[in-house]
Image (spheres, grey):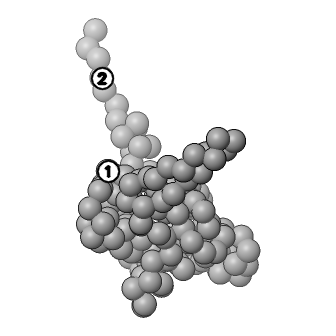
Amino acid sequence: MRARQVLDDCRKAHSLLEHEDDPQTFRILFVAAVTLCRAVGHVLDKVDAKEDPRLKESVQSWWRELNSDTTKNTIFHNFIDQQRNNILKEYHFAHDDHEQKLMVLPSMELFSLGELLFCPIEEGKYAGEDCRDILHDAILWWDEQLKKLEWQSKVETPNAQRSTLNFQVEP
């Protein structure tokens, strides 16, 4: 499935984000990662479902269920879709990439974390969580969704395809 390739690219962008310390590069990588994360669904629907008839019905049913109740699958509605829309339509980032101040109790000592060490989401369901952690959760969510769709449609996952290789050993 081509959607898996998009998801793998999203994983790579996330990996690069984990180690990035330049604010502009971080922002660019975050835009790429969120866009790729949302593109998984578009490619699944517009490419994979059209190219593989086994997937078409499962994907259509899955999309209907996903969109019928926005209180379910909140990672999609409240992060993947919302972040993509905020960034691509308004160039608005819901996370704070500035230096963070922390107070340690009970000593009341104040410490500073450098830029990009902790980038909390400032609003919505995931407020207070690091944007990279929620992106990671979104990647895991997509992987699980793709596995379910592959299983329902009897489409082999890349790992399943590799495990079916037969090696003959000569006596």
Which kind of residue does numbered mark 2 sit on? Gln
In this rendering, position of residue 41 left or right of residue 107: left
Q: Name the residue: 54% across, 80% down.
A: 82
Q: CA distance from mark 2 to mark 1?
A: 43 Å
Q: Position of residue 56 (x, y in %)?
A: 51, 74
Q: Position of residue 98 (x, y in %)?
A: 41, 66
Q: Name the residue: 36% across, 40% down.
A: 162
Which numbered disc covers residue 19?
Answer: 1
In this rendering, position of residue 153 left or right of residue 42: right
Is 2 in front, or is 139? 139
Is 168 in front, or is 97? 97
Which numbered disc covers residue 168?
Answer: 2
In this rendering, position of residue 41 left or right of residue 103: left
| Position of 16 relative to 161 (above/below) | below
Q: Position of residue 121 (x, y in %)?
A: 54, 68
Q: Position of residue 42 (x, y in %)?
A: 44, 78
Tell me the crowding category of disc 1: few under 14, some 14 to 19, or many 20 or more residues within 10 angstroms, Cα based. Answer: few
Q: Name the residue: 73% across, 78% down.
A: 69
Is 100 in front, or is 154? 100
| Position of 107 relative to 21 (above/below) | above
Which kind of residue does numbered mark 1 sit on? His
User: Can residue 45 be seen here?
Assistant: no
Is 117 in front, or is 145? 117
Instruction: For the C terminus, give its image quadrant.
Output: top left
Q: Nearer the viewer, mark 2 or mark 1?
A: 1
Which numbered disc covers residue 84?
Answer: none
